[in-house]
Amino acid sequence: MGRQGARPDAPALLAGARLLAGLFLVVALTSRQASSLAAALFVMAALEGLTLLHWSLARQGPPGNDGLAEPLSGSIYRLTVSAAFLANGWLPAWMLIVIFARDLVVPYLRAAVRQRSQDLTAGLGDRLAAVAHAVAQLGVVAMAFEDWGPGLGPQGPLAFTLLVVAVAFSAWSLVEHFARSAQMLKS
């Protein structure tokens, strides 16, 4: 946020939207009702659109730090949706552990690097993980909303594959952060 009386900036608005949406999505997704799943799809797609807009605006402006709110809200959003998926039986527990580990460790790595007056910014792995999670989450919810046939439900092989790809990118992001932070802390 900035000075007192200043309008909230894009990262702060995105963070707030993600936090509110995460609470709504837990309820909507676990209800498994068609109207709730349709609303969840709409909210999730709108948030992904806001995220793309944020990325686009961030690339046009001067390099900066979104602070803690934007990445933290992304982690909380990802974890709330993943927890709802786990509750529905759409996500195995081991996948949630990998997602949680990445989202728990990366802020500590960033803090360690920041103590050396450097910034551990989002890397390619972060961007690809965000896209993979968006595609997987939207895909799984769409499969739950509409019966696409045998093997194409939220517990079918296509949904599982989408989730495995998203989790693999989360793991890559974690490894990338470890490697970059080790290099920065060594210098």
Image: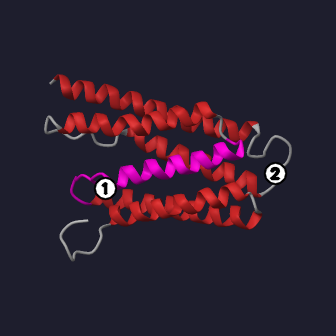
The question of residue 79 being in magenta is answered with yes
Q: Nearer the viewer, residue 75 or 11?
A: 75
Q: Residue at x 53, y 58 (%)?
A: 22
Q: Is residue 54 left or right of residue 169?
A: left
Residue 60 screen position, x and y as percent: 28, 60
Residue 166 screen position, x and y as percent: 55, 39
Q: Quadrant of the C terminus?
A: top left
Depicted 29 relative to depicted 165: above or below: below
In the rendered structure, which segment of residues is drawn in magenta? 61-90
Residue 52 screen position, x and y as percent: 44, 58
Give the amino acid type for the residue marked by disc 2 in the picture. Trp
Magenta-highlighted stretch: main secondary structure? helix
The question of residue 17 being in magenta is answered with no
On the image, numbered disc 2 is attached to which residue?
148
Give the amino acid type for the residue marked by disc 1 in the picture. Arg
Secondary structure under badge 1?
Answer: helix
Q: Residue at x 40, y 37 (%)?
A: 104
Graded by Cα atoms within 10 Å as few (under 14), some (14 to 19) or many (20 or more), the crowding at tag 2 reads few
Q: Nearer the viewer, residue 152 or 79?
A: 79
Q: Nearer the viewer, residue 85 or 152?
A: 85
Depicted 39 relative to depicted 153: above or below: below
- Disc with the residue nearer the chain's start (2 vs 1): 1
Give residue 56's quadrant in the image. bottom left
On the image, numbered disc 1 is attached to which residue?
59
Q: Quadrant of the N terminus?
A: bottom left
In this rendering, the label closer to the viewer, 2 or 1? 2
